[in-house]
Amino acid sequence: MRLRPHLPAALATTASAGLVLALAACGTSSAGADAGTAASPAAPTSDAPVATTYPVTLDNCGFAVTIDAAPQRVVTIKSSTAETLLALGLGDRIVGSAYLDGPLPDSLADAARGTAVEQPFSDEVPGTEATLALEPDLVYAGWESNVTADGAGDRGTLEQLGVDTYVSPSACKGEGYMPDPLTFDKVFAEIAEVGEVFDVNPAATDLVAAQRETLASVTPDDRGLTALWYSSGDDMPYVGAGIGAPQMILDAVGLENVAADVHDTWTSMSWEQVVADDPDVIVLVDATWNSAEDKVARLEANPATAELTAVREHRYLTVPFPATEAGVRNVDAVVDLAAQLRELDLP
């Protein structure tokens, strides 16, 4: 079984259309995180420069990174990073993909075909030797811990060896760098920054525009329903807390997180507290190593949790693990959860 700190549906029709548009736009360039409505590939909407001016210098989670040219050989670690590059039409730049959290959404299947994402070189965080064997010029990591001496390599050491590193800014943990709270604007800003690093600015601009449009199409539920975001754990559940991706997604859906007062991205919570909160619905993170079905069985077998209103009434929503970490699938999660919520038999 894969050990993870926590556990997490294809893009909705609108988002898929925007993704196709963004992929088609990769042959041109223009920078920026700003997004209005999606434009045709022939007419990018951004007023920013078409091409990236190198070098690009970044303060990435407190580590100074200087990118001298658009990366051509990239190792991605975690699903969120691989999916971001695929969504930007950069699958051919990926020479190795590792530590994927689950299957790709259908909307990225074509973009992944024939790329290294189809056959990850490691199911876990890769070691330094395995990473360097692929001769990358950039390691794009989903977590800071992915680029340490115990993982793909210490960032300073990799830099000395000519390998740049870029960590998803949404996963930064240092003071002043950790999103507090995580917002969709910050998720979209990462897409724009990656577009600048790789000199595919118009693709990033159009992808963000499409995602903003899709997000705006969702009407949050206004009934004041409460929810538990149940990620993992048996004796003690590990749940989405008040400042991370789960909170961001629940806010967009219109659900009140019972753990919103915990100032963290994820937290452990006692079953006694869950029973006391008695959430109206339970969001189940579906992972290959800890499925939503397993969680339902656990909830229904426990005499205490079996009496929860959501369990008695089978008020479950599910979300795939890869959609629960900051990235291009968060908007999809909002659309999908909102649709599931509408289908529940609620007073």
Image (cartoon, grey):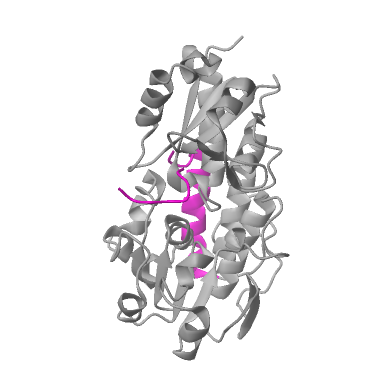
Q: Taking 196 as reference, is 121 left or right?
A: left
Residue 225 shown in magenta: no
Asked if residue 139 is positioned above or below residue 88 in the image, the reply reads below
Residue nearest the viewer, comparing 242 with 132? 242
- Res. 44 in view: no
Write down the quadrant of residue 126 in the picture.
Answer: bottom left
- Please say whether residue 16 is visible from this viewpoint: yes
Q: Which residues are magenta?
A: 1-28
User: How far across and how far down the image is residue 295, in percent?
Assistant: 40, 30
For image coordinates 61% across by 27% down, the residue present is 273
Please tell me which residue is depicted at 46% across the width and 63% down the height of the picture: 85
The quarter of the rendered structure image containing the C terminus is top right
Work out whether residue 236 or residue 339 is closer to the camera in this orientation and state it: 236
Q: Is residue 309 left or right of residue 289?
A: right
Residue 340 is situated, as x and y percent measured from the top left of the image, at 50, 25
Per the image, is 12 magenta? yes
| Observer-nearest of 145 and 22 | 145
Give the side of residue 8 with respect to residue 257, left or right: left
| Place of residue 321 in the rendered image (x, y in percent of width and height, measured from the top left) | 44, 44
